[in-house]
Image: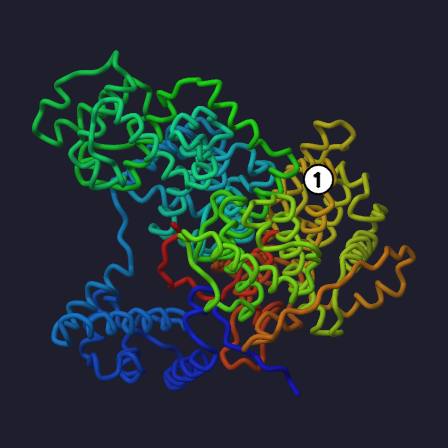
Amino acid sequence: MSAFEGVVVSDPGLQSQFTQVELRSLKSKFSSIKTKSGHVTVSDLPPVLAKLKGVSGLYTEDDLRAALEDSYPDPTHEIDFESFLMEFLNFAGRASASTKGSGYRRASSILRQTVTTHFRTISESEKASYVAHINNYLGNDPFLKKYLPLDPKTNQLFELVKGGVLLCKLINVAVPGTIDERAINTKKDLNPWEINENHTLCLNSAKAIGCTVVNIGTQDLVEGRPHLIMGLISQMIKIQLLADLNLKKTPQLVELLGDDNDVGELMSLPPEKVLLKWMNFQLKKSGYTKEVTNFSTDLKDGEAYAHLLNVLAPEHSTTSTLETTDPTQRAKLIIDQAEKLDCKKYISPKDIVDGSTNLNLTFVAQIFQQRNGLTVDNEKISLTTVLDDDTQTSREERCFRLWINSLGTATYVNNLFEDVRSGWVLLEVLDKVSPGSVNWKRASKPPIKMPFKKVENCNQVIDVGKGLKFSLVNVAGSDFVQGNKKLILAFLWQLMRFTMLQLLRNLRSFSQGKEITDADILNWANQKVKSSGKSSHIDSFKDRSLSNGKFFLELLSAVQPRVVNWKVVTSGETDEDKKLNATYIISVARKLGCSIFLLPEDIIEVNQKMILTLTASIMYWSLQHKPAQLQSLQTIEETETHKPVQLQSLQTVEETETPDASVPKPDASPSEPDASLSAPAASVSAPDALSSSPAALPSVSEEGDSLPDELSNLSVEDDALVTAASPQATTDELGLSEQEDTTEK
């Protein structure tokens, strides 16, 4: 008897809106239309939507048809299943809102408004600002200079993004050194495979610098979808401009503290909040009494800007800025004054008067970068010395923080050690990796004023961890509340390793049903390299020979021969050569489809944990795309002459309503990459952490019985659970091409 096949969609957020019963019912209705006509068009939707619970009786077919016409002028436009789900949610949600408001009579106008905004328009002012930023920072790039400067009045930006090079370069502007540019495909005429590799590298690298790329995939970039591209660029620019708004980069920020010296509170604030705190701190010096609480309405009149610049740059101060009564004229004077501080002209007077949140934020961040007005108070700065983590702790904090944020949980983590102390974030992660394991009735959501509520949350974290067989001897919830870094990191490592081995086990169980261990991963890697004709071999994930990078380069080449350019590989003998190889390895792995968060130093210093996650990530990608290898794993164990000590394998996550949704089906499709690529790769749900590369273009089965190439029914919800340990589904053709969601937090 075949295993139960759940209906899987590529967006975990969309999947979470429905139960499997609902999804199967909706899939059946959608398929019935498709069966009759061969495909589903916009004109087919109103009769079906009008009969669905939540919409039926509230809107007529004419209401729905009129609403859809505003967004789909062509009634013959083809609709896929995920777009059908999105439209249903859109109408059902608005129907619910309308019943609480003015009734049914205004339903059509409400629907038109909602559906129109669902397909987003972009801000021309923001586009002009981002184009100016790109022209300024990348105008002299050896590859891009022939395409720059871009004209903001045209769609040149979106056309240039399609090739995949621009966003990769922009990531390196935001966080220098993130992408090894030797891994970017930059020849004049790129084929679809190479273009998709660039986009895969871009999305995985964007997550590695902290971008939220939920519901954006390679196909969205290939198609040059304006609002998704704008959202991604916006995040990159913010990351660049807000990089110094932390105590490690700017210890003078301790001056913002009051007499209570609550450094922890300041550390837990997101950069945007720190920027507001800094702005208000400076405004008080000028006697400005209003508090700025946002980057929109509070800045429209320009008064706050005028006072801020007068305080920071008294040599350029002028009374005319405040004396003028015309907001637009005042905004112009503000911009002129800021230019004297070398602030780039990325904002217009109209943007200030209109209260553009994104552009005001970047403008204030530029002012902070050029002149923050903070004094060097050695006594206060000494407070930050006790906060300095050792290098290893700092790197692990970064890895786990980025991994958690990639899961798509509701809470965004800015400072790991501070944000997990309430227990809420850890409960969200546990519920994501082991659905149903958290009793939310016992949990308290932040902000939590009573300390014992935090302890209750953290105690439940410990209980769930013990249920997953984590080693938590003598660990109590109060340890997390008190911010015990060592225990927090140890718990998160077990959690990450659990998800990693669980997902690999799901692949393996397809053929053998066994638990997978660290030793299995090691044996697979050695056997894979050996089968490619190479002689490299490692005894453990602590093997010092790993530091030169050759083993991983040979492993990547064995998995996908064309992905490594051996002409740029160094001997790995000197420290500099090791750094070059390590940087190249990470970029090549991301280009292949691995969503990983380690740093080159982790490879050079042979950080056992990070080495394991990298190897597991490559393994998952390989097994995902060449399922026949699953059958050989047992043989590897039996024939491998070197048998490492078997490490404890972890118990499987309790099966959910769709237990086999993450298990891929093998196929007989061609294994050669070009053979399986007939078009540009399709979209990816951005927080997906599991692998998928340009070589495979899987899709969701219509009926759940005969699954297509390589990975057809892999659940993207499960993908996101192993982000740090396994690759991203960057070429999944699982939907999202018609889905319109923002990339911003």
The structure residue drawn at horizontal position 48% and vertical position 69%, both measured from the top left corner, is 9
Left or right for 632, reference 18: right
Q: Secondary structure at mark 1?
A: helix
Q: Nearer the viewer, residue 135 or 274?
A: 274
In the rendered image, the vertical position of residue 621 relative to residue 278, given as above or below: below
Left or right for 695, reference 419: right
Answer with the quarter of the image where residue 497 lies. Answer: bottom right
Left or right for 47, reference 717: left
Image location (x, y in percent) of residue 165: 49, 41
Q: For the residue marked with disc 1, what is the amino acid? A: Ile
| Res 686 seen here | no
| Res 100 seen here | yes
Q: Nearer the viewer, residue 149 or 189?
A: 149
The structure residue drawn at horizontal position 29% and vertical position 70%, both measured from the top left corner, is 93
Image location (x, y in percent) of residue 590: 59, 48
Image location (x, y in percent) of residue 119: 29, 59
Q: Nearer the viewer, residue 455 or 433?
A: 455
- Residue hosting label 1: 603
Give the position of the N terminus as an image quadrant. Answer: bottom right
Image location (x, y in percent) of residue 191: 53, 50
